[in-house]
Image: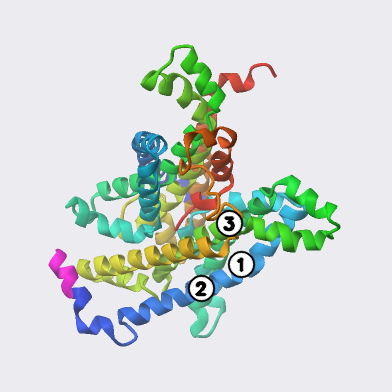
Amino acid sequence: MTWVWEHLGDIGGYAVSHALLAGIPLLVGLLIALPLGWLARRYPPVASVIVGGSSLLYTIPSLALFILMPLVLGSRILDAINVYVAMTIYTVALLVRTVADALGAVPESTRQAATAMGYRGFGRLVAVDLPLAVPVLAAGLRVAAVSNVSIVSVASLIGYPQLGYYLTDGYQRSFPLEIGVGIVGCLLLALLFDGAIRVGEWALTPWARAGR
Amino acid sequence: MLTAIWVWLTAPEQWSGTRGIPNRVLEHLGYSALALAIAAAIAIPLGLWVGHSGRAQWIVTATNAARAVPSLGLLFAVAMLVGPRISSDLAYVIPSLVVLVLLAIPPLVSGAYAGVRAVDPAVRDAAYGMGMRPREVLRQVEVPCALPLVLSGARAATLQVIATATIAAAVSLGGLGRYLIDGLAVRDYAQMAGGAVVVALLALVVDIGWGLLTRYAVSPGLSGRAAKPARGKHPAGEDVGRHDAPATSSAVLPTGSEPR
């Protein structure tokens, strides 16, 4: 256990870079997935292209995607941008379908009522459809967050420093405690993301707790 | 860069022998199929039983929570703890297989469970009303109706297993991951990228294969070809009664499983 105390500072640093590598792509991915999901919902002919295409991207194994990123981006092999972009691709791939489903889950009667009250187009989307889509969106985001935290650790195989470093280093040194630190760190980080998204959902859906 | 990868991919030594691409593909598929078969034999009956009986639902919760364990960590932990206890050539294979099986179980369990749970209660009642026994209801009604979600669980599990089998090269498993890990060790980017292209193609082809299988295995009377649920394939008016259908399915679909 003394090993853990001695390395607490390093662990914290790695946890922060892990959180950034998983969290920033989560936000960017959501911002990209929102218009794509809306497009898929709005124009059915393109839906299969968008949803199908993104789910094909999701099939690429993470290690392979990390390695192929420099080819696509023209970046250096050890550049962190490779991990950020790869994680954003996975997030978008997971969330596009969620966004389309979430917008589809808004009750038609509500939509018609909003239209009758004078909401239209973009205004209705932002003021009515999106808030009502939050619960389904949050569920998808939680899946994507846990998935991102796990995938990011794979990047340690090609040398990007984050909590996954303790997994590879612990294995190379046959040091179970270090692997344990890596696993527990990832689990705690996943829990943290999950909790943050739950809080966000709670704050954005006041009607869900009204009248109870 | 691209030419170097092309040269690597087309070099004759990549197309023969134990280190050649064909053999690595077969290894990769073999380990993956074995792990999936073992996992399916455990997980699908379990998920069906929990869904059918409504008992021990904590199993589903627990397997879903287990997805948060990073697969790389599980791989290294099992390889370190189990590997040294096996004194044959299998010392490299068994730990990796154990991990692949463990990682395939959660999507399979939740697919089977969600599939049975999603069966229309009216259909189930009708089956009981016709005098079917619980076992018959499960076999003749619930399992066929649950098939789309069972298969989508299997599809997610397959992706997970193929991706993790790639990483398992780091603990000395054969398969296509070898090119990625060995190429990294000797700083041969052409080999790494060439291997990555092959493994990505393999994953795509297998996934498309699952898609086709799902299409033809599921009864046409169900969601299949007769009446496809939502996703805007039908006129907008028809949408009204079903607006909740896609959302429910996405909430239970294991497609968002934790990969790699």
Q: Amino acid at mark 1?
A: Ala
Q: Amino acid at mark 3?
A: Pro
Q: Which residue is mark 2?
A: B33
From the viewer's side, name the closer residue of A13 and A209: A209
Q: Which residue is mark 3?
A: B148
Q: Quadrant of the C terminus of chain B?
A: bottom left
Residue furthest out toward the right: B131
Label 2: state its secondary structure.
Answer: helix
Identify the disc placed on residue B40.
1
Residue at (43% x, 20% y) in the render = A124
Q: Amino acid at mark 2?
A: Ala
Give the mark, 3 or 2, whose residue is nearer the N terminus: 2
Label 3: state its secondary structure.
Answer: helix
Whether pointer 1 and pointer 3 mark residues with C-beta atoms closer than 8 Å, the reply is no
- Res A137 seen here: no
Q: Which residues are magenta?
A: B1-7
Give the mark, 2 or 1, whose residue is nearer the N terminus: 2
Residue A133: horizontal and vertical position, in percent? 50, 30
